[in-house]
Image (cartoon, rainbow, N blue to C red):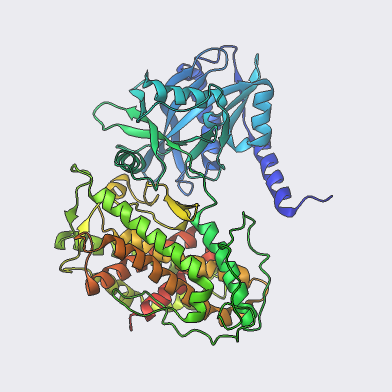
């Protein structure tokens, strides 16, 4: 049997990493490796290539001038030690940053297993009197157990320049004495390790000068009894002289779920396009979809022959909904045919809207300076508009620089957007001096369908770290709740077009006929989400009213689409058409 091309490519990539691993000559005593000249050898021969392989390493495009261990402590003593280390980097452009890198020295079969199965987690082979490997500690069971022990017992471990402190939040952990660890994928921006399918240990790799928002917000939500997010059970802090405690990791409860909101939504969209295309004479293949557990609608009685969702109902005309955003206070209803097809998903979107509102209300009701609401006044609105301008210019400059590399489907949209650059930037000036714009609170900050889990026909909200490209101070800053709302509205639109392009990958000529249905889907699903959100928030002073709501939400949605544009241009240029189409329709719907 021949190996599938993707599996063969993955095998070749692993083999290339194994071949490139440096071999370090070390003596018999490994437990003092970081207190001797061996540390310098590791820095010079192994540290840089290891970091460049990691998904969580954020500066791959920068040229490293120097990488070195600046703090460490032995987590495990003995012949096969483990260390908690801080790696600091200096780049040729002057930028500096530090990363949390737990390390374990392994020998025998365990070392060979990690080298063979997860070579990307290996710093180096070890040769000499003893043979083994230096590996990322998250892949070593005993290292994970010892980190868990720090949290459970509230221990503090001295390091060369500070200390690491474990914290237990709430009740003692409900774990069996035998800990069975499984790991998240190596493509995660953080490192995840699951113990007994009850708790997940999340390690934050890039060090910050203050607490991680995930620790802050998850702790507040747990304390206040908010049940639609994993409960915080523990944390690992880094203490340094003259600095606030930093967050190295958190321990949270595992949520039983049926997949992410993104998987659930894309699966529903595939069925939606199948039903619609069957009624308009097209039935493209859906083989381009990645495999994931199927999500089926609730069972119920068969539709009568005169119901729009019945297979023999006459084909509908193409929808004529104006692409863009549903307006505040609109009393319009979705077309009967669409409502019949998508009633259960519209209900689901409204549920997510309610949960989002409950999240915002809970955060806004939290006492203390770090969480108390503040007015979104003129100064804050001007700063917001300035930030949106800067963000937009950076994304447009990146687009302009890579214009010649874009595929034919994307190029017309890119040219049109660059030609309307000034009109686009003017949209952000509309928020300046906006009276009654509501309040600023702590929010999720990077809200989209990939950040929620579908759990028993409801949702659980994850990952409160904020946008990874923002500074820690920006991610901890109070913002309008509409930023989160806009993120989810854009995510629905993104899903509609990502699913459309996957559905028509073998029949691209059918895209034009189905695109109005994509617009209809995203419009009415966003409307259901917004309706659920507004019904729950009610007359809260957190949010602007009517026309102010529409102007502020539109600015946030365009800003989010430009964030997507900048990301796709730099990381996935084949996807850049999706945010380009979204921006085109958002600007067009304003009448400009």
Picture layout, residue 141 above or below residue 343: above
Residue 121: image x %, image y %? Answer: 58, 35
Residue drawn at (41%, 47%) of the image: 463
Residue 182: image x %, image y %? Answer: 58, 35
Picture layout, residue 293 above or below residue 556: above
Residue drawn at (30%, 68%) of the image: 553
Residue 125: image x %, image y %? Answer: 63, 27
Residue drawn at (63%, 62%) of the image: 289
Image quarter (top left, top right, bottom left or bottom right) of the C terminus: bottom left
Q: How many marks?
A: 0
Picture layout, residue 212 above or below residue 579: above
Q: Is residue 509 visible?
A: no
On the image, which quarter does residue 529 sit in? bottom left
Q: Nearer the viewer, residue 548 or 87?
A: 548
On the image, which quarter does residue 407 sit in? bottom right
Residue 576: image x %, image y %? Answer: 50, 67
Residue drawn at (32%, 52%) of the image: 359
Answer left or right for 507 relative to 90.
right
Q: Is residue 570 visible?
A: yes
Answer left or right for 260 relative to 118.
left
Q: Nearer the viewer, residue 434 or 209?
A: 434
Picture layout, residue 233 above or below residue 400: above
């Amino acid at each position: 049997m021949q190996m599938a091309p993707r599996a063969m490519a993955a095998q070749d990539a692993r083999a290339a990493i194994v071949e490139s691993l440096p071999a370090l000559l070390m003596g018999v005593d490994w437990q003092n490796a970081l207190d001797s000249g061996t540390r310098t050898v590791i820095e010079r021969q192994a540290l840089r290539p290891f970091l460049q392989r990691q998904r969580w390493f954020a500066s791959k495009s920068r040229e490293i001038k120097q990488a070195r261990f600046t703090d460490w402590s032995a987590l495990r003593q003995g012949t096969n030690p483990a260390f908690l280390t801080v790696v600091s980097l200096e780049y040729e452009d002057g930028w500096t940053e530090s990363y949390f890198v737990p390390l374990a020295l392994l020998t025998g079969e365990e070392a060979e297993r990690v080298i063979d199965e997860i070579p990307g987690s290996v710093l180096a082979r070890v040769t000499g009197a003893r043979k083994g490997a230096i590996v990322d500690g998250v892949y070593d069971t005993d290292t994970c157990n010892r980190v868990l022990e720090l949290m459970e017992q509230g221990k503090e471990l001295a390091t060369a320049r500070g200390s690491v402190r474990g914290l237990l939040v709430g009740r003692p952990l409900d774990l069996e004495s035998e800990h069975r660890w499984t790991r998240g994928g190596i493509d995660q921006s953080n490192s995840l390790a699951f113990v007994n399918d009850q708790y997940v240990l999340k390690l934050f790799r890039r060090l910050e000068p203050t607490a991680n928002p995930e620790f802050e917000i998850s702790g507040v939500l747990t304390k206040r009894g908010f049940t639609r997010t994993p409960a915080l059970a523990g944390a690992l802090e880094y203490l340094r002289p003259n600095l606030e405690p930093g967050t190295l990791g958190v321990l949270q409860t595992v949520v039983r779920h049926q997949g992410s909101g993104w998987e659930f939504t894309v699966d529903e969209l595939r069925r939606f396009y199948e039903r619609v295309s069957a009624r308009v004479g097209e039935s493209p293949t859906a083989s381009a979809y990645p495999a994931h557990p199927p999500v089926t609608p609730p069972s119920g009685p068969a539709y009568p022959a005169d119901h729009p969702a019945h297979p023999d109902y006459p084909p509908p005309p193409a929808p004529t909904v104006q692409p863009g955003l549903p307006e505040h206070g609109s009393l319009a209803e979705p077309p009967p045919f669409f409502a019949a097809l998508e009633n259960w998903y519209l209900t689901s979107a409204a549920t997510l809207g309610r949960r989002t509102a409950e999240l915002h209300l809970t955060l806004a009701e939290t006492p203390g300076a770090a969480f108390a609401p503040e007015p979104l006044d003129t100064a804050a609105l001007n700063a917001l508009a300035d930030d949106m301008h800067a963000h937009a210019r950076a994304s447009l400059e990146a687009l302009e620089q890579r214009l010649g590399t874009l595929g034919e489907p994307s190029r017309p949209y890119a040219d049109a957007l660059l030609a309307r650059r000034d009109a686009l930037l003017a949209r952000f000036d509309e928020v300046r001096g906006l009276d009654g714009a509501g309040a600023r609170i702590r929010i999720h900050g990077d809200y989209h369908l990939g950040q929620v889990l579908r759990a028993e026909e409801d949702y659980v909200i994850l990952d409160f770290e904020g946008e990874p490209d923002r500074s820690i101070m920006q991610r901890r800053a109070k913002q309008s709740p509409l930023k989160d709302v806009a993120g989810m509205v854009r995510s629905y639109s993104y899903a509609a077009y990502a699913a459309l392009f996957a559905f028509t990958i073998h029949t691209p000529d059918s895209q034009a006929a189905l695109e109005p249905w994509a617009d209809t889907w995203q419009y009415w699903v966003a409307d259901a989400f917004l309706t659920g959100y507004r019904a729950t928030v009610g007359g809260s002073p957190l949010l602007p009213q009517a026309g102010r709501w529409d102007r502020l939400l539109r600015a946030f949605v365009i800003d989010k689409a430009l964030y997507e544009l900048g990301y796709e241009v730099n990381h996935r240029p084949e996807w850049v058409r999706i945010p380009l189409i979204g921006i085109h329709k958002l600007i067009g719907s304003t009448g400009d």
